[in-house]
Amino acid sequence: MHGRDHRQHHHHQPEQLNNLNVQGHVRRHNRIVAGSNNFNHLGGPGGNDGGGLGSVATEAVCRISRHSVLTQQQQRNLSLNVSNASFSSQQQPPHHRLLPSGSSALQRRSHHRASRSSRLTAAATPNTEAASGSSVPPPAIPETVGSANRYPLWLPEYKRKAFNASMDEKYVETIWASLKNAIQEIQKKNNSGLSFEQLYRNAYNMVLHKHGNRLYYGLREVVSEHLEHKVRTEVLESLHSNFLPKLNQAWTDHQTSMVMIRDILMYMDRVYVQQREVDNVYNLGLILFRDQVVRYSEIQKALREKLLGMVMEERHGEAINHLAIKNACSMLITLGINSRTVYEEDFEKPFLAQSAAFYKFESQNFLAENNAGVYIKKVEARITEESSRAALYLDKDTEPRIVRVVEEELIKKHMRPIVEMENSGVVYMIKNSKTEDLACTYKLFSRLKEEGLKVIADTMSAYLREQGRMLVKEEENGNTNPITFVQNLLDLKDRFDQFLTHSFSNDRIFKNVISSDFEHFLNLNNKSPEYLSLFIDDKLKKGGKGMSEQEIESILDKTMVLFRFLLEKDVFERYYKTHLAKRLLLNKSVSDDFEKNMISKLKTECGCQFTSKLEGMFKDMSVSNTIMDEFKNFVNNNNLSLGGVELTVRILTTGFWPTQTATPNCNIPSAPREAFEIFKNFYLNKHSGRQLTLQPQMGTAYINAVFYGRKAIDSDKDKDAPSSSSSGSGAPTTTRKHILQVSTYQMCVLLLFNNRDVLTYDDIHQETDIPERELVRALQSLSMGKPAQRLLVRNSKTKTKDIEPTDEFYVNDAFVSKFHRVKIQTVAAKGESEPERKETRGKVDEDRKHEIEAAIVRIMKARKRMAHNLLVSDVTSQLKSRFLPSPVFIKKRIEGLIEREYLQRSPEDRKVYNYLA
């Protein structure tokens, strides 16, 4: 029990590993270190079990109590604290320095006292296993004090032994044999009787003594042999029955065994594998399984065919074992070792190729048998199905790849046939307002990004442009008036905005296409600026269509959208100014708030310059009200008579209002003319140096009219003479008085009938000298308007709506109205006549000359020197918010500025201009 180890015939002094305790023998005190392993020479508990008694100085031996005797019970307690780690099977026991058998009782009592002192530390770490079947010798006092410090404190017991022991080849083979046997038992699932701790130590010793190469390649040989002769054979036998479950079971077993083997050989993984830069134990097992089993030609082919076959079965509606495919795919991913190479080569690439062929055939059948709507829904179903399949049992990175294959075969290669399919394509959907089908088409084609969406957008654009050209053509043929033309455009815009919102998710591509198309066909009609202004004028007039304020606001917003598409915004401005002037002067505006709101919208679009004149018009109206108050005071204070005329004059600033350069001819009746002369003298006396020019086309008049009833002899003079009686019975014979609200021109016509009963058109024209177009409008309003507003009766031989020079007119004495104040509506203008339009264009061109020249001078003043093409580009860029000047027009203005010496050509290059200050 207390003898030396029979395998150690010679005591080998271990090398000093460090200098932690080299000078330990000099210190004269006891050392107890918790968690240290430096007392194996005392026979105490070593290993990793916690604290122990360190060096015992010689002074401790002398301090012995005479009565302290080591009893048998205390020796037993000490034996129970011995660490099992120091006496494991097949490990050499630690080297002890024991007391001679004849040591004195004094020495034994001294050691017993020291042991009891260290029991606090030794008992702090419970032992995992008591030493069984062996008698533990009592601790021995070292022969020399310095021997306690031969090993560092941190070195475990079994490592000290490894340093001491030498491993010959025979011992290496013995250890390897035990390890090989253990590996084979693990592969056979007989690992319950193995001591993994002992196996770990054996592997550790082999690596520590430079036999890692033998261990590593021996492991590879054992695993390879097992896979080749057992696993592969079993898998091959199950090729035609239960193949995937058998392969999966073999794979699971192999993974489990490799995890256990890896744990045993963990020290080799940490040291040998990293030093030699070879595959670690677990990865080595994966590589061997891949090469010996999965990529064995017959197994590899069978696995691929089985997986692809099961996927095809599911595509045809059959039920399959999803878990089996998922396990197989997971195995292939794992075998790639941080790479998808194995999975891609053995399954994914063949899978994608097979899928492409399958869907290529299916797309042809789908197109032949279904219309566009059904085809799109089937494609969506297939994409959803493939996406779900990939998410369910394939690798997550396979999903976008298989979806891409389906998109390529079912959508990309058939985009045009789907979109242009007769009676079901995109045009059919738009015509029949198939919003949901369009949304499905958009959603499907959006998978192809801009390439797919552009196909739909191009088809839609072609249809939209065709519709726009038809609207323009209808207007040119005279089938629609300006109001209807603009309303049709707004309806078309609303319709496609609905598609944009509900079918195309406000996609930028479709929004740009719709805007571009409207800009294209809106500017095909050079009357569009005028018509747009007439449309706004119609909506802002009083008593228009009985619309609410919200409806008017909505229509104005939509009109502004069309306004943005106009290239000739300056032409629109001129027409809008004319129409606004009429609304303000004739007091026909529905609301000043709406007018100012509209101007605010135009200001936002085009800037302050665009609306400065329009705002000036409102200012003139305010100033005119003040002047009229002053004039009334002037008349009252001076007791002046206006001949029974109540005069209201609006003073218009020439630059702001669309006044005509040449004052229209019109013979104003004497009474209003004399009243105006009094006001003219008043104003010019107050504001010297100014000129006042009467603009009769913008005025209104209120006339007191008396209708005496139709004479009996005239009862059947003219069958066309209307009866305004609401009862429809005979003509009224009583006298009736009304106040008539008419235009200045209508007033001039009506006052002629105070002196004559019947007048022809030529007579009226000669008497009033009103411009022909305005006279026709006035007579049409008075004689051909609504039955309740016909003040005159027209006697025409042609019976057409057009007024002829020989037509006769006389007062309609049968006129009856339930209103005392009657407003005679002017026939709505159908736009300017061709001569007027040419005149307006001439004015616009004249304004453009000044704007282009101003832009050229601004740019050249800033740049000083500029090439022709660059100057043209900058001028176009500055002016495009108002109109699009042609390069030829710009060049003419440059020539004009050179003649007036604002610019000069550069002597070196005639295409370069210099600015002259």
Image (cartoon, rainbow, N blue to C red):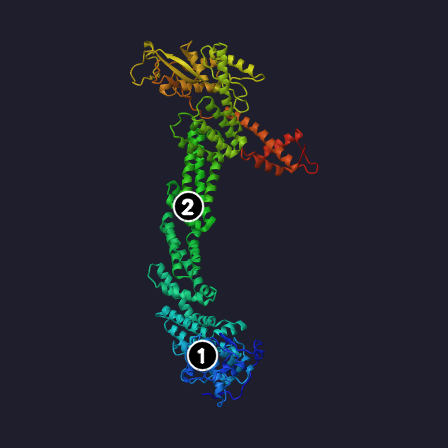
Q: Which residue is mark 2?
A: 420
Secondary structure type for disc 2 = loop
Q: Report the disc number at residue 675.
A: none
Q: Is residue 25 above or below residue 361?
A: below
Residue type at tag 2: Glu
Give the Cα separation between the discs numbered 1 and 2.
88 Å
Q: Position of residue 652 (x, y in %)?
A: 52, 21
Residue at image location 45% in from the left, 28% down from the top: 593
In the picture as drawn, the residue positioned furthest to the front comes out as 66
Residue 889 visible in image: yes
Q: Report the disc number at residue 83.
A: 1
In the picture as drawn, the residue positioned furthest to the bottom comes out as 102
Q: Classify residue 870 by image quadrant.
A: top right
Q: Quadrant of the C terminus?
A: top right
Residue type at tag 1: Ser
Q: Position of residue 671 (x, y in %)?
A: 47, 11
In the picture as drawn, the residue positioned furthest to the right comes out as 907
